[in-house]
Amino acid sequence: MMLFPDIGRLVIAFVILFALFRLIEMLRPPSRRLPLLRRGLATDIAYWLFTPFVAKVVTRIAVILAILPIALLAYGRFDAEAIGQGFGPMSRLPLWLQAIGILTLGDFIGYWMHRWFHGRAMWNFHAVHHSSTDLDWLSSVRLHPVNDVLMRLAGTVPVVALGFAPLAVAGIVPFLTLMAILVHARLDWDWGPFRAVFVSPRFHRWHHTDEAAARDTNFAGLLPVWDILFGTYYMPKGQAPSRFGTTTPVPPGLLGQMIFPFLRRPGNGR
Ligand SMILES: [Zn+2]
Ligand SMILES: [Zn+2]
């Protein structure tokens, strides 16, 4: 596992995404276009530097420390390659079946973790992610490190502990990252007949709206089935969200957003 990202690839991906989403904006009528210098742009740009080079590094170190005891128990040493192969009965399943298992289990845990972050105790950490009012693809990385670390630990540790081979999903990770960015984009896409199968921009943008009817809905990160099963699915026919943000007074800048959850008393949900 590499601690730091490949700067070259990161810059190229950012430039391509920036050009693509800007082109989509320019194709809209001017009245519906989001200006380049939209609200919160500087904060989101700061997050695009902070997230890969600081927050994700912290998260990776936390994950390594958490799976260290599992690796020592399973292999007697910490060997990234061996961990990638998994151990026990799960690791002997076909890789495609393991990939489905890992994604389903990880997304189920992610659903409940996300609901926990919307509750009294954790909301202030998660309010940072909900603070974008001009929500677009750039807002996707606006995440407090405490939020990121706990979500990743909860999703990764059980998968490794059960013996799944993480390499089964290694090829899918870039696609999942792209999906996480795409679902925040200013696109009214819902995948048509697959709208209840995979999360879409319309699905996740409803999660970010400040409209009362959609409050605390659409928690899934990949599979809306969890929202359907647990009664939080919200996709009204023919409608799309238009207002975003939170009533929680989250400071506008990155530094303020880092400190804010430690200073504000918990208990004021959104
Ligand atoms: Zn949320
Ligand atoms: Zn989001």
Image (cartoon, helix red, strand yellow):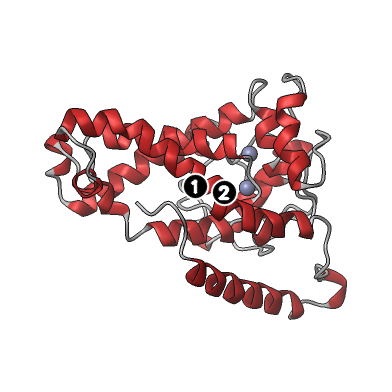
Cα gap from disc 2 to disc 1, whole angstroms: 5 Å
The location of residue 121, given as percent across then percent down, is 64, 20
Q: Which residue is disc 2 drawn over?
A: 54
Q: Which residue is disc 1 drawn over?
A: 57
Answer few, some or many: residues within 10 Å of disc 1's Cα (few below 14, many 20 plus, some between 14 and 19): some
Answer few, some or many: residues within 10 Å of disc 2's Cα (few below 14, many 20 plus, some between 14 and 19): some
Up-down relation of residue 46 to residue 230 (above or below):
below
The answer to whether 104 appears left or right of 141 in the picture is: left
| Callout 2: SS | helix
Q: Residue at the spot x=51%, y=67% of the render?
A: 7
Query: Can you see residue 221?
Result: no
The location of residue 93, given as percent across then percent down, is 14, 45
Query: Can you see residue 88?
Result: yes
| Image quadrant containing the C terminus | top right
Question: Which amino acid is tagged 1?
Answer: Val
Q: Is mark 1 within 8 Å of ligand 2?
A: no
Q: Is mark 2 within 8 Å of ligand 2?
A: no
For ligand 1, the image quadrant comes to top right
Question: What is the residue that sits farthest to the right in this orientation?
Answer: 31
The answer to whether 247 appears left or right of 9 in the picture is: right
